[in-house]
Image (spheres, coloured by chain):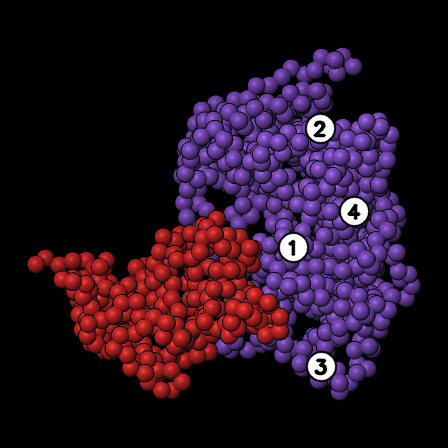
């Protein structure tokens, strides 16, 4: 049951409310030194109060921005709440960003205060202080390696708490007064959009917007204080912010922080979350792991797996949706649940999952069906940073692989004549920080937010998104060209990790393919193909053939859809390196930057179109420590078979 | 950058040590000292006697001549030949050039073996596992978990060591040595066979150990970049003789060392 919000119009007020009514219930868990440590609402709120008083002592002012660079840890969340208690605005930054990427938000918001998880993050912040003269105070969590840094303004979290506790004792009423000053219309957080195309923009979200949306979704899914969530995605991403900060406060559920990024799978199995979010790429990686392990299993197990997965494929989704299923299938599914699906859910750490969401990009229909067929209630949702996430959610029983569901309560939707989705919702953002022009472009005078996504309503009133409006283009002959649609179709193959389609204003469509190292390496091993590394494997003729088969299947598929049948992929090449955010080829949320890639690999694009059969490439790669290295390779450019447009459709 | 544990007085002095295996003279009257909290490197071409020197310090080899003086709790102890058990009790821990872990055991158990000398309960108590034995095991487990946290190997805690890549096995071996809470840590080629990233990680861990626990470290290494970067002082051996001793800067300019490494026309 979601709680009655009433006068509790800010996050700090909600936090204090939970501390009062459920002080002994778990608020945050973290695995530390191999043991799950629980922070209860009562003690957690006390820590937040101390931290807030510490920050007040250090001079944090109302309305001031506060940068946070940390993985999911209880102290990160304590700091966010503490900042909000004083009317400050937390600005979580991506913890894997390189130092120069952190400079922009800090300069943009003239940030004076920052919180850093450990020495690595402190070093990054210190590195950019020359460009960011405003940055004066850094609070760090893990003191390892930092004890004798000696820079002015560097404080440990413990010291901050100690000072805060002192101040709290001297003047216990101060903080309550500060919390009471907060209003729902105040900015609760500023999140920087990933910037698929341009410089990142700071999206200011109010307490009211976030609370409203968090509550609408919590009511729809009947979330309550017995739910458990694993906080494992970057805190700078709006989804993580909603799932591990806004929704816990609206419902009182408990979030769990994994021990380290590498231990997420194990931690998830131990915790057994009931409410789960995963972007499609995570779900895909999990399925790939399962498939690889299944291939190595004994023959009996493989046989069982195949047989029962066929049953699940046939009946699983229908059983989950409550649609009629034949009695035989029901019995078979029952046994399948005992022998295969149950254990499989357990291995995935999803035994307890009641509601699972996926969003961020299109999910492959097979992948989506797989999870649903083994009894995991995976659903799609639609939203963005600007809309406080929840715009559309698929309700239980109305789940389809290719739509994102109808509008959530409180949201108005419509499509413009250019097929752009526009939204009016209480969850809309306040503004792009210091960018009134962009704000005006995105949010028109009547309050409609222009998403930039193109799509349409299907027959049941569900929203279907096909691509970004500005990316939907035309080929030279005028046919519709939706690159992301093509790329997604390619990415649904396990062997394809990323794809980049080109064709805007050209005669034909061509594509770059990035192979998936895990899947292709396993495939190669089964065929006794030897290779020395990624580049070598990607340039093998056998791998090119494998990829060609995928491309041709996509083409066959496209030939069935009259409108875009002409955008079949004529030529492709397999890239010699993995596209990487560090090289500016993907955004931090791993979306392809088509323009940047087209620029960077202009030579390769030219080769696709001028009919050459191979091209030599030399590329610079940036290692994680900031050094650069060079890669060179000969890439083969291949033709793919295309299919005539399906006659039946054409006639119709 | 000032250090949490500034380099202090001498804690280990090797004086006139000679070691021969039959006719092969591995060490000839080698003398050097190691100061508290410092990172001391031993370098030299192949067969120079570096590993033999480490083996003498922790009592695996027994030199024919010379003494080793070791300072514990402010008092000097002098050994003609060190006994390896005694060395361990004095707080000397080491890693090996060829990884010497228990391949079939998990990372956790391997590191736990590093606590062996600190176990006080007899095996009967441990078999019954109540009271003292239980509390003791909890304390040891905590110490091991701290090492695991320190070396950032939580994700392989329960993985059998034999399944791990080489770089991680090296890290586990360092973990086992650290679990003994050593005063003096001997590292025999901690970076051999590693790629650049693994080397950087290992360098960081070695410096962190020195910085965080104040452990005195003696290491053998072939990668000159690493040695020059992380060590305070360097000893150079060649054919069992000491041919140089000093700060990395001094060693870099030492003609005898350059000749030993590059070879000279005779």
* Among the two numbered marks 2 and 1 on one chain, the one whose residue lies closer to the N terminus: 1
- Is the residue marked by circle 3 packed among few (<14), some (14-19), or many (20+) residues within 10 Å? many
Q: Earlier in the sequence, mark 1 or mark 3?
A: 3
Asked if badge 1 and badge 3 are on a common chain, one would say yes
The disc label shown at residue A355, or none: 4
- Label whose residue precedes the other's in the sequence (1 or 4): 1
Label 2, on which residue? A310
Q: From the image, tell me which residue sits under label 3.
A: A165
Query: Which of the two discs, 1 and 4, sits closer to the camera?
Result: 1
Subunit under mark 3: A
Whether residue A456 can be seen here: no
- The answer to which image quadrant residue A229 occupies is bottom right
Q: Tell me, for residue A267, which label it has, or none.
A: 1
User: Residue visible at 65% across and 55% down?
Assistant: A267
Tell me the residue at 86%/48% (across/down): A220
In the depicted view, which residue is nearer to us: A494 or A645?
Answer: A494
The picture places residue A123, in percent across and down from the top left corner, at 52, 66
- In the picture, one chain is purple; tell me its letter: A
Q: Are marks 1 and 4 on the same chain?
A: yes
* x, y percent for residue A10: 82, 65
Question: How many neighbours does mark 1 have within 10 angstroms: few (below 14), some (14-19), or many (20 or more)?
Answer: many
**Colour given to chain B in the rendered image:** red
Q: Give the mark nearer the N terminus: 2 vs 4.
A: 2
The reply to whether the C-beta atoms of the residues labelled 4 and 3 are less than 8 Å apart is: no
Q: The numbered mark 4 sits on a residue in which chain? A: A
Residue A70's mark?
A: none
Mark 1 falls on what kind of element? Answer: helix
């Amino acid at each position: 049951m979601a709680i009655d919000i009433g006068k509790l119009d800010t996050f700090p007020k909600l936090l204090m409310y939970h501390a009062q009514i459920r002080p002994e219930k778990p608020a945050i868990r973290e695995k530390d030194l191999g043991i799950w440590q629980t922070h209860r609402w009562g003690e957690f709120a006390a820590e937040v109060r101390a931290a807030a008083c510490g920050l007040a002592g250090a001079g944090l002012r109302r309305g001031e921005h506060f940068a946070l660079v940390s993985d999911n840890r209880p102290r990160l969340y304590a700091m966010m709440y503490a900042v909000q208690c004083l009317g400050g605005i937390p600005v979580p930054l991506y913890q894997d960003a390189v130092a120069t990427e952190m400079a922009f938000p800090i300069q943009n918001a003239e940030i004076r205060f920052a919180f850093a998880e450990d020495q690595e993050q402190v070093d990054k912040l210190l590195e950019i202080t020359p460009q960011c003269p405003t940055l004066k105070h850094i609070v760090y969590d893990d003191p390892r390696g930092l004890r004798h840094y000696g820079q002015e303004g560097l404080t440990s979290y413990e010291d901050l708490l100690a000072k805060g506790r002192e101040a709290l004792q001297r003047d216990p009423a101060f903080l309550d007064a500060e919390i009471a000053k907060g209003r729902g219309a105040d900015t609760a957080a500023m999140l920087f959009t990933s910037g698929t195309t341009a410089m990142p923009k700071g999206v200011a979200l109010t307490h009211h917007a976030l609370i409203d949306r968090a509550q609408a979704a919590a009511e729809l899914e009947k979330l309550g204080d017995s739910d458990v969530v694993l906080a494992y995605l970057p805190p700078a991403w709006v989804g993580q912010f909603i799932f591990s900060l806004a929704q816990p406060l609206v419902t009182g559920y408990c979030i769990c922080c994994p021990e380290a990024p590498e231990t997420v799978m194990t931690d998830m199995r131990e915790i057994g979350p009931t409410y789960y979010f995963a972007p499609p790429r995570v779900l895909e990686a999990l399925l790939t792991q399962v498939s690889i392990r299944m291939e190595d299993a004994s023959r009996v197990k493989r046989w069982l797996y195949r047989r029962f997965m066929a049953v699940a494929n046939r009946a699983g989704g229908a059983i989950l949706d409550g649609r009629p299923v034949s009695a035989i299938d029901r019995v078979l599914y029952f046994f399948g649940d005992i022998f295969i699906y149950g254990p499989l859910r357990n291995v995935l750490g999803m035994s307890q999952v009641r509601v699972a969401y996926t969003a961020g990009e299109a999910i492959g229909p097979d992948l989506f069906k797989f999870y649903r067929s083994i009894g995991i209630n995976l659903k799609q949702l639609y939203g963005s940073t600007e809309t406080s996430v929840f715009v559309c959610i698929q309700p239980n029983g109305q789940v389809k692989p290719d739509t994102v569901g109808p509008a959530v309560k409180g949201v108005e939707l419509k499509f413009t004549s250019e097929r752009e989705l526009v939204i009016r919702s209480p969850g809309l953002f306040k503004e792009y920080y210091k960018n009134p022009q962009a704000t005006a472009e995105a949010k028109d005078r009547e309050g409609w937010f222009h998403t930039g996504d193109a799509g349409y309503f299907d027959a049941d009133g569900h929203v279907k998104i096909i691509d970004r409006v500005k990316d939907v283009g035309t080929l030279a002959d005028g046919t519709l060209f939706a690159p992301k649609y093509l790329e997604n179709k390619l990415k649904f193959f396990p062997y394809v990790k990323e794809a980049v389609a080109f064709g805007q204003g050209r005669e034909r469509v061509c594509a770059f393919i990035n192979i998936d190292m895990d899947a292709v390496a396993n495939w190669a091993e089964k065929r006794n193909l030897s290779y020395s590394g990624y580049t070598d494997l990607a340039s093998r003729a056998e791998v090119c053939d494998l990829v060609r088969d995928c491309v041709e299947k996509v083409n066959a598929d496209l030939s069935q859809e009259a409108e875009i049948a002409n955008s079949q992929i004529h030529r492709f090449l397999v890239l010699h390196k993995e596209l990487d955010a560090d090289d500016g080829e993907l955004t931090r949320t791993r979306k392809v930057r088509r323009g940047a890639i087209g620029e960077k690999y202009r030579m390769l694009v030219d080769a696709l179109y001028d009919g050459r059969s191979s091209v030599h490439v030399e590329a610079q790669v940036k290692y994680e420590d900031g050094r650069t290295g060079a890669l060179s390779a000969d890439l083969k450019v291949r033709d793919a078979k295309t299919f005539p447009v399906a006659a039946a459709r054409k006639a119709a | 950058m000032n250090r949490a544990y500034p380099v202090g007085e001498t804690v280990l002095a090797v004086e006139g040590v000679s070691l021969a295996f039959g006719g092969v003279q591995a060490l000839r009257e080698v003398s050097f000292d190691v100061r508290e909290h410092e990172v001391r490197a031993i370098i030299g071409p192949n067969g120079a006697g570096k590993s033999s020197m480490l083996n003498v310090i922790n009592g695996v080899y027994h030199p024919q001549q010379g003494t080793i003086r070791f300072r514990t709790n402010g008092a000097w102890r002098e050994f003609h030949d060190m006994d390896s058990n005694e060395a361990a009790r004095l707080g000397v821990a080491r890693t090996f050039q060829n990884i010497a872990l228990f391949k079939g055991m998990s990372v956790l158990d391997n590191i736990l073996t590093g606590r062996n000398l600190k176990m006080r309960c007899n095996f009967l108590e441990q078999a019954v596992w109540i009271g003292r034995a239980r509390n003791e095991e909890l304390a040891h487990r905590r110490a091991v978990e701290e090492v695991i946290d320190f070396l950032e190997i939580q994700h392989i805690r329960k993985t059998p060591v034999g399944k791990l890549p080489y770089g991680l096995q090296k890290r586990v071996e360092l973990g086992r040595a650290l679990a003994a809470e050593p005063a003096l840590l001997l590292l025999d080629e901690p970076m051999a066979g590693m790629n650049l990233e693994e080397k950087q990680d290992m360098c960081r861990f070695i410096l962190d150990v020195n910085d965080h626990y104040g452990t005195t470290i003696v290491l053998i290494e072939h990668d000159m970049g690493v040695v020059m970067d992380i060590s305070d002082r360097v000893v150079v051996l060649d054919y069992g003789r000491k041919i140089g001793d000093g700060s990395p800067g001094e060693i870099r300019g030492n003609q005898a060392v350059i000749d030993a490494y590059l070879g000279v026309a005779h």
